[in-house]
Image (cartoon, helix red, strand yellow):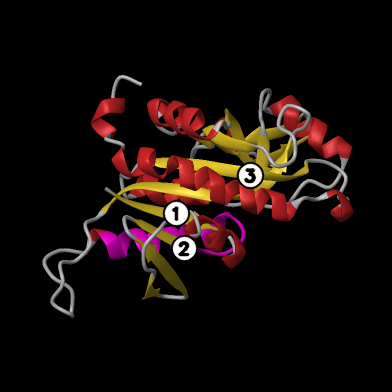
Amino acid sequence: MRVLVVTAVPVERDAVTRAFGGAEEHVALPGAELHRRGAFDVLAGGAGPAAAAAATAFALASGASASGTSASGAPAPAPYGLVVSAGIGGAFTPVTPLGSLIVADGIVAADLGAETADGFLPVTALGFGRDRFTPPPALVRAVAAATGAAAGPVLTVSTVTGSAERAGALLAAHPGALAEAMEGFGVAEAAARADVPVLEVRAVSNAVGPRDRDAWRIGDALAALTDAFGKAAPVLEGWNSHEDLEG
């Protein structure tokens, strides 16, 4: 099965591709470039949910149209069977310490909605849209077991949290949330419209709250991301969506 992995920036993309063996092929897409290794296509789609959704949609459309043979005469790749949003992110420590791994059992748009006099209302409370996607539960369990990751909700935000007050408000609105990042919901939105299952994997680089760049561990998080995909690759490539229909 072919797997599309979408990160925000090239350094995350490269951390993921380092986990896979074999030669790397580069495939041009509008505004981006796929790095292909075996069954895995890895794309740096840009920061934020809008860029992530657009890049994912372009890649999925390219994969869906693949059939027959390529221009070189070689067999064209099969369509994607899974999309993974991946990268580093902030975590609500101490539940998920720096350098640890998280696999999302819910991909939540934490700031998609409206502010009111009584507080924040999610888009679903306004009567339209959705604010959550649920990855296949059996796949979440399998990836968590293979990598040692914690499983829990990952929040998608358009503005990274920079205060203890905002971190507390997010946890109050989303009890049990493990992390925040900026792309997961956008990737999931595109995947859902293409009827392709989605997963989100994050390596923790910093704590959610007051910004202290000196305390961030980006290098450790990128190394953890590489290790995670090295361990999870057989699970992702071999996963059969039909096995997860019972959850």
Instruction: Using the rendered image of the protein, determine whether residue 157 is visible from the camera's viewpoint.
Output: no
Q: Residue furthest top?
A: 246
N-terminal-most mark, 3 or 1: 1
Q: Report helix, strand or loop for mark 3.
A: strand
73 is higher (above) or lower (below) than 110: below
- Please say whether residue 202 is one of the residues in the magenta stretch: no
Most foreground residue, 39 or 231: 231
Residue 150 is situated, as x and y percent measured from the top left of the image, at 60, 29
Instruction: Using the rendered image of the protein, determine whether residue 200 is visible from the camera's viewpoint.
Output: yes
Residue 142 is situated, as x and y percent measured from the top left of the image, at 42, 29
Q: Marks 1 and 2: in contact by CB < 8 Å?
A: yes
| Residue 148, picture quadrant | top right
| Residue 236, picture quadrant | top left
Most foreground residue, 9 or 156: 9
Label 2 belongs to which residue? 43
Label 3 belongs to which residue? 203
